[in-house]
Amino acid sequence: MFIEIAYGLLGLALVALVIYMIFFLSKIGKVVDETQKTIQVLTSDVNVTLHQTNDLLAKVNVLTDDLNQKVATIDPLFTAVADLSESVSDLNDQARQLSVKAASAGGKTVKASIGLKAIQMASKLFK
């Protein structure tokens, strides 16, 4: 009789275990389904993001090419401005030397100051 009770308890334990496993596996199945849905959404979002990133990179490349062309066009202008600046600097140096000579010449300062004024006006035009 004890054996029959032991077998009965063992049978009940197995039934309880099977019921518990059914609920447990059901919950795991739901988790797996949600995980698959999440992975599908993430994959879709990543694909959209990659597509947008590729478009953005293409636009940046076009913009960079355009910018490089414009900088190449402007480079001669900067070279010309640098040359002009150097010429104006040389002109100023010569005007200073001329004013020193005029100051040392004494009575000829009127003619030198007129020449100095002309040089200063010319240098203002180049600025």
Image (cartoon, rainbow, N blue to C red):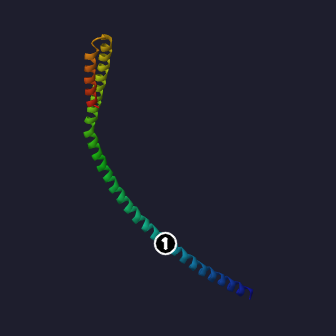
Q: Is residue 121 left or right of residue 51?
A: left
Is 58 located above or below residue 103 in the figure?
Answer: below
Name the side, left or right, on which 12 lies relative to 122.
Answer: right
Could you say which is closer to the camera, residue 2 or residue 119? 119
Pick out the residue farthest to the bottom. Answer: 1
Q: State the image coordinates of residue 64 (x, y, percent, origin top left).
A: 31, 47
Q: Amino acid at mark 1?
A: Glu
The quarter of the rendered structure image containing the N terminus is: bottom right
Left or right position of 11 against 96: right
**Residue, disc 1:** 34
Q: Secondary structure at mark 1?
A: helix
How many numbered marks, from 0 up?
A: 1
Question: In the rendered image of this protein, does residue 97 appear above or below residue 49?
Answer: above
* Residue at 57%, 76% in the rendered image: 24
The x and y percentages for residue 22 are 56, 79
Say above or below: 67 vs 59.
Answer: above
Give x and y (percent) for residue 4.
70, 87
